[in-house]
Image: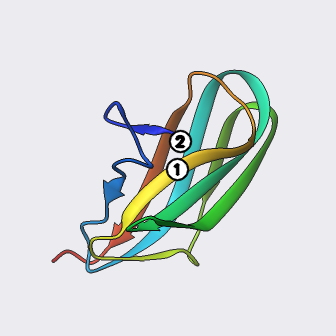
Amino acid sequence: YLQVDSVPSNLAGRIVPFSTGTLSNVFISCQTAATFTLEVQDRVNTTFTTVYTATVTNSRKFTETGISNVQFALGDEVCVRIGTGSCSNVVLGLVIKGSPL
């Protein structure tokens, strides 16, 4: 699992602060070209549900914009992991757009 402020996201993920949130952009870079899958998960207690998957093929960078079919609710906990393959020194960004409280 990728880290959130130095804590593995499966232990403490990022909380969605919107009444309704939509994942709109994903961007990632890693140290060297790699092939792997990236999984964004919604955690409820001890259950992790994969809500978005991207495949990166022999690249250092990946960006996807215009995502609109991944919804989150207020208080959802978002976790991210490398599903298959591997990469090193990963930097990840997620843009979740939503209605303010």
Marks 1 and 2 in Cβ contact (< 8 Å): yes
- Would residue 22 be found to the left or right of residue 40 on screen? left
Which residue: 52% across, 50% down?
Answer: 80
- In this rendering, the answer to whether 72 lies above or below 32 is below
Q: Which residue is mark 2?
A: 1
Which residue is at the front of the view, 66 or 85?
A: 85
Total labels: the figure holds 2
Q: Residues within 10 Å of mark 2 (few under 14, many from 20)?
A: some
- Would residue 44 be found to the left or right of residue 66 on screen? left
Q: Which residue is mark 1?
A: 80
- Would residue 11 be found to the left or right of residue 84 on screen? left
Which residue: 37% across, 68% down?
Answer: 45
- In this rendering, the answer to whether 50 lies above or below 94 is below
Q: Amino acid at mark 1?
A: Val
Identify the secondary structure beneath mark 2. Answer: loop
Identify the secondary structure beneath mark 1. Answer: strand
Q: Amino acid at mark 2?
A: Tyr
Q: Residues within 10 Å of mark 1 (few under 14, many from 20)?
A: many
